Amino acid sequence: MKTINKIITLCFGIALLISCNQYTDGINEDPNNFQNAPAELLIGQGNLAVIKLSESQSSRVAGIWVDHFTGSDRQYELLQIYGTTASDYDDDWDDIYTNGLAQAKLAEDGAVEIENPILEGVAQIQQAILLGEAAALWGDVPNTEALDNVTYPNPNYDNQLEVLSYVQNLLTKAISNLGGVKVSDFYNNGYVLNEATWKEVAHSLKARYYMIVKNYPMALLEAKMGVSSPEASLMAFHSNAEGSKNLYYQFQVELRGGYLTAAGPSHLYNLLNGTTARLLDTPGDSKRLAFYFNGTNINTTEEGYFAVDASFPVVSWIETKLIEAEAEQRVNMGTAGEPAFTEVRNYLATAYGDVFPTSTSSGDQLLNEILEEKYVSLPGSLQVFHDARRTKNVLGIPIKKPNGTLLPQRFLYPQTEINSNDNFPGLIDLFTPTEVNK
C-alpha cells in the first residue's frame, strides 16, 4: 500500500505545487528545501496534506471499517476483516507529520516573521486538522516535542486529550487572525473557490473536535458559528487534469481497480437500496444510491460522487449542521435537534430532487436518526469512523471480522515509530479504545 500512496501523493502534488509557482518566481534556493521556501509556498504543501488525509488511504481504511465500502481484492481483502499491520500506517503518519505539520508550522513561523496574520491563521487551521485527526485516529501522539529532530530526536507522545485541547487553542488563535476573509481570496491552493470563509471553517473544526471529546455544549456553540451554507463548505478541488484528479477516482480507475467496492453488499449500500431499513424512511435514497455507487462499484462515472472532477468535502455544511443537530439533541433532548436536522433533509430533497421526509421523532430515536443521516451523508469521511467509536456503534454497523465483537477502535502506530523512536509508548491492540472513547 506504500507504493499506492506515494503514486497518489506525487500525482496530486504536481498540480498543487505548479499552482504555487506564482510564489516562487525568482527564488534561487533549492526548491526541495522547504525550510528556505517562502511561507506562501509552504501553505500549499499543508493544503495538500490536509486533502490527502481527508480523501486518500486513511479515508479508504476508515470507510471499509465502518462498512461504507468493501475491501474486495489483495491487501484490501485483509482490511475487510480488520487484518492490518503497523507498516500499513507508515505513509499516513509521514503525510501528517513530515509532509503536513512540518510545512504548516514553518508557514506559521514565516507568517509571524512577515507579519501576515491571515497566512498565520490558515497555517494554524492546517495544523489543527492534521493534529486533531492524528489524535482521533491514534490516541496519544507526539505534539510538544514533534517537528524538532535536533532537540527531540525521539519525541515523547502527548496525551490524546491534551493534544485535542491544543487543537482548540490553535483554532482560537486562527479565528482571531483571520477575520472574515474568504478561502477563495487567500491561500486556497487545492480548494474549490466558493463562499467558504476561513473563520467559519475554523468554527466548524472546533465543533468537530469538541464532538470527538464529547463536549456537546461547546460543539453546539461552535457549530452554530460554523459553515453557514452548502456553498460555503471547504471542498477539495479536482479536475480531469493530470495531478488534479479526485483521489478516489485515481485509486479506483488508474491504480487499483476492484480493490474498493460495495460488494457484499456494504452496510451503506444496503441502507440506500432498502435491504436494511432506515431509521427514518427515505425514498430519495434511491437517487443517492445511484450517485454513490455504479452497481457495486464506487461511482466514478461522469455524474458520480467519485467522478474524476468531483470535489470532496474537507469541512462541509452537512457535517456542521448534523453536529449541531446531534449536540442540540444531546444537550436539550425532546425534539431539540429537529430544526437543524430538518435543514439538512430539506437541502437533500432539493439536491436530489426527491423525497427526504422530515422527522417526527423525539428523544433517543431522533438522536439515532441524526447519527444515521451523518453516516449516510458522508461516504468515505473519517468523521463517520470517529462517530462509530464515540457512540460505541449505536447504529449497529456490522462487525466484519469473523467471531468479532468490536469495530476497530484506532489506527495502529506505524512501524517507522516502532523502529526509530526510543520513546515509542508500546504496541496497542487495534480494538483498544483511545482515551476519549473509553
Image (spheres, helix red, strand yellow):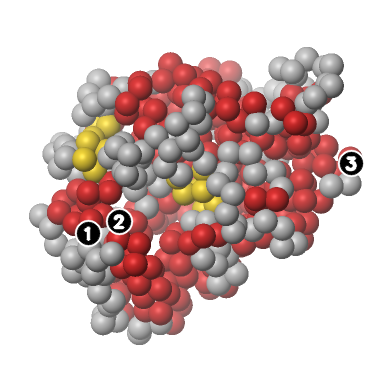
Quickly name the residue at label 3: 114
Residue sitting at x 40%, y 47%: 381
Quarter of the rendering occupied by the N terminus: top left
Q: Is residue 430 visible?
A: no
Label 3 or label 2, whichever comes before in sequence order = 3
Image quadrant holding the C terminus, namely bottom left
Whole-Å distance between the Cαs marked 3 and 2?
44 Å
Q: Nearer the viewer, mark 1 or mark 3?
A: 1
Residue depicted at x 66% and y 35%: 44
Label of residue 285 in the image: 1
Dot 1 or dot 3: first in sequence order is 3
Residue type, numbered disc 3: Ile
The answer to whether residue 402 is visible is: yes
Q: Position of residue 133 (x, y in %)?
A: 52, 44
| 180 lies left or right of 338 | right
- State the image coordinates of residue 192 (x, y, percent, origin top left): 55, 47
* Neighbourhood count class around disc 1 (C-alpha, 10 Å): few under 14, some 14–19, many 20 upward: many
Q: Are marks 3 and 2 in contact (CB under 8 Å)?
A: no
SS of the residue under disc 3 = loop
Return the residue at label 2.
376
Residue 252 image-quadrant placement: top left
